[in-house]
Amino acid sequence: MSPKLAQRRAAKAVRRKRVLTEKRSAASSSLGECVRHLAARPLHCCLMQAALFEHGIGVVLLARQLETGALAIAAFLVDVFCLGIKDVGFQVIQKSELGGYLRMIDETMPMTPIDPSYARKLLSDAAAYAARLGLRPPRDFAAIEQLFGGFSSEVCTETFRFGCNGKPLYAPGPSESVAQIRRRVATLMRTLGPDGFALANPFDDAVEEVAELPAA
């Protein structure tokens, strides 16, 4: 390949990456504006899976009722053992659909009502814990978290404990790709060293193989 052709391809790749970044930023901005607008609607419920701290992972959910009677729902998968905010979701559903939505979550662990300020502090502290490990929350977390609106985490005095037995415990889930697992293990290695964290299922061939791979 000629140097000029290589340069043109490299420049094209840079432009493509810039466009993709701009699209993602615009989408996140639009989502943030939408959520901020809906944050003024009345609170319908705020729930958390009761055994979240026992199992190390669970769902925190906040719903607001819209003028149409539908519900705007922000859901957060919280990993208090390592990743902090593992996943986020936002959707608008009919009020009649909420029961079925919650039953799907209840199949893993029952939900219990919690104060929104408690929930927001848990999310904030979990994200901060993961950040200290070098791990970032999902891209839309900041936008979706705004559905809490005027509920401030500062009024909650709860102190949350993160990690497991004194250090982070990373438990890769079935929804995580090999690339994600590789990056997260590499980040933990750089931040904490090989003895600074634990890896769940260390004898699982796939996890063990990924853990030994260098970061991409």
Image: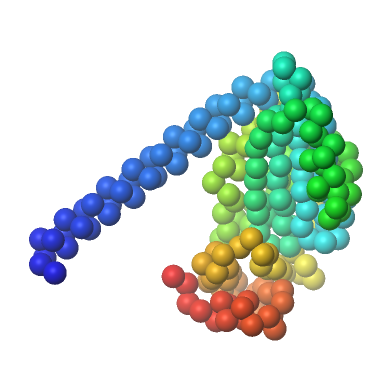
| Residue 134 appears left or right of 78 | left
**Looking at the picture, does residue 63 appear above or below residue 80?**
above
Q: Quadrant of the C terminus?
A: bottom left
User: How far from the left and from the top, in percent, is residue 82?
Assistant: 68, 62
Residue 152 visible? The answer is: no
Q: Quadrant of residue 165?
A: bottom right
Q: Quadrant of residue 3?
A: bottom left
Q: Which residue is painted at 70% across and 68% down in the image?
A: 171
Foreground of the two, 13 or 194: 13
How many numbered marks are there? 0
Q: Which residue is painted at 58% across and 58% down in the image?
A: 135
Q: Residue furthest top?
A: 67
| Residue 84 appears left or right of 210 | right
**Looking at the picture, does residue 195 appear above or below residue 136?**
below
Residue 88 visible? The answer is: yes
User: How far from the left and from the top, in percent, is residue 77?
Assistant: 71, 50
Q: Quadrant of residue 94?
A: top right
User: How far from the left and from the top, in percent, is residue 20?
Assistant: 38, 45
Foreground of the two, 40 or 178: 178
User: How far from the left and from the top, in percent, is residue 86?
Assistant: 65, 54
Q: Quadrant of the N terminus?
A: bottom left
Q: Which residue is painted at 69% across and 20% down in the image?
A: 40
Q: Which residue is painted at 64% across and 60% down in the image?
A: 175
Foreground of the two, 189 or 17: 17
